[in-house]
């Protein structure tokens, strides 16, 4: 019997080089990217155009964009299997974003929780780019006819909006875009700040945040200082024990243990034993990533080859979708 060759489904995801990569972005996104790279055709992007929605120092942004690629590879993403590129190298992202912006309502964008949070955080610089960020994100995803978007919980709302925009466009002009689904991990979907377990671990909050490139000493210090509560039991209870629950989640995601196994392991032991144990698990998780990343960063020519080849491939795919969109909305062919 003839075997049917199934086309692999496609994945797109990206992270802004607006700061160093964090344990949150690793557990919420990159770890899953690595797990999915064999079963899917994957595009993993460094979304520098998103990063400038808040002020960046140009030299730092340039350096971070390249070191983020080195860290992606060090985390286990294989450039031979995945298309890895820098967003601004593929101008079709900006072009599709303009078109999709004309099919997105002001009211929809006003409801985005990330916009509300970031416009409070950057009250002196609330730009149109910050407001239309989700439209650019929709363009990133739809440009590649993406099936699956592996992201942390905080990005779910943006993926939902992307689906709404795609559905609206498809409804007006017949099927143009694949409708993407968010892929949110079971463990680590929302890693919380070590300093304030009520808020998300973010690269813009260095005190509560563990960076992939942190030294073992820094990691241990951050975990020993992590905010907990005045009880002693190591138990998962998100409402009453937010700090301990966060540390348990990090421990499970770092070691692959279940919540029950982790609770049993630390039963009867105080936080003085538990907190350093979580720190050590994270140190061991990140040790090879840090070492490999430092090694790859020495080879600038290799990194340049990866992002240039990635952008060539991405542009080829993106052009197909963009031409279709331009035709459908009524632009005259070149
Ligand atoms: N704390 C987190 N827990 C789980 N997943 C997380 N992600 C980020 N933080 C956590 C996921 O990682 C990807 C990073 O996306 P991003 O850097 O482009 O956007 P972000 O969510 O705005 O990142 P930060 O760290 O919060 O940046 P700042 O401080 O600049 O606002 C996404 O898939 C996200 O879900």
Image (cartoon, rainbow, N blue to C red):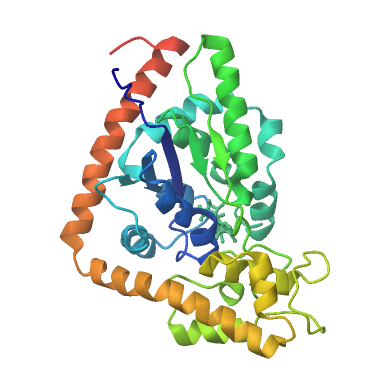
Asked if residue 304 lies left or right of residue 119, the reply is left
Q: In the figure, 169 relative to 267: above or below?
A: above
> Farthest bottom residue?
272
Total number of numbered discs in the rendering: 0
Looking at the image, is 21 positioned above or below residue 128? below
Q: Residue at x 66, y 57 (%)?
A: 123
Q: Which quadrant of the rendered structure holds the C terminus?
A: top left
Above or below, 227 against 123 in this view is below
Which quarter is ligand 1 in?
bottom right
Q: Quadrant of the N terminus?
A: top left
Residue 273 picture location, percent across and down = 64, 88
Q: Residue furthest front?
A: 1
Looking at the picture, does residue 168 appear above or below residue 113? Answer: above
Can the viewer see residue 8? yes
Which quadrant holds residue 161? Answer: top right
Horizontal and vertical percent for residue 239?
A: 82, 64
Who's the residue at 50% across and 14% down the image? 175
Q: Nearer the viewer, residue 291 or 22?
A: 291
Image coords of residue 286 (percent x, y):
43, 72
Which residue is located at x 57 percent, y 51 percent?
185
Q: Quadrant of residue 107?
A: top right
Q: Is residue 195 visible?
A: no
For image coordinates 33% across by 21% down, the residue present is 4
Q: Residue furthest left?
A: 301
Residue 283: x %, y % from top left: 47, 79
């Amino acid at each position: 019997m003839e075997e049917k060759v199934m086309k692999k489904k496609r994945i797109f995801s990206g992270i802004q080089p607006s700061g160093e990569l964090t344990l949150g972005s690793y557990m919420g996104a990159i770890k899953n990217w690595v797990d999915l790279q064999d079963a899917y055709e994957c595009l993993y992007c460094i979304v520098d155009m998103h990063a400038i929605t808040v002020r960046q120092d140009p030299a730092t942004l340039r350096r971070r964009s390249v070191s983020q690629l080195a860290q992606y590879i060090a985390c286990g993403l294989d450039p031979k299997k995945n298309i890895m590129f820098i967003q601004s190298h593929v101008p079709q992202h900006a072009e599709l974003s303009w078109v999709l912006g004309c099919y997105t309502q002001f009211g929809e964008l006003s409801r985005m929780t990330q916009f509300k949070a970031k416009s409070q955080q950057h009250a002196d610089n609330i730009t149109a780019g910050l407001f239309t960020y989700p439209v650019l994100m929709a363009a990133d995803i739809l440009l590649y006819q993406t099936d699956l978007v592996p992201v942390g919980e905080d990005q779910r709302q943006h993926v939902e909006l992307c689906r709404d925009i795609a559905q609206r466009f498809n409804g007006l002009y017949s099927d143009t875009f694949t409708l993407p689904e968010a892929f949110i991990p079971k463990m680590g979907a929302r890693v919380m700040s070590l300093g304030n377990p009520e808020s998300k671990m973010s690269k813009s909050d260095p005190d509560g945040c563990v960076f992939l490139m942190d030294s073992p000493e820094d990691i241990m210090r951050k975990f020993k200082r992590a905010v907990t509560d005045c009880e002693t039991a190591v138990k998962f209870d998100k409402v009453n024990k937010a700090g301990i629950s966060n540390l348990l989640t990090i421990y499970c995601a770092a070691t692959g243990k279940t919540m029950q196994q982790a609770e049993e392991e630390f039963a009867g032991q105080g936080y003085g034993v538990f907190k350093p144990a979580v720190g050590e698990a994270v140190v061991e998780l990140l040790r090879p990533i840090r070492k490999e990343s430092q090694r790859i960063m020495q080879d600038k020519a290799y990194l340049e080859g990866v992002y240039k080849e990635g952008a060539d491939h991405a542009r080829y795919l993106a052009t197909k979708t963009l031409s279709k969109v331009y035709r459908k909305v009524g632009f005259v062919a070149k």
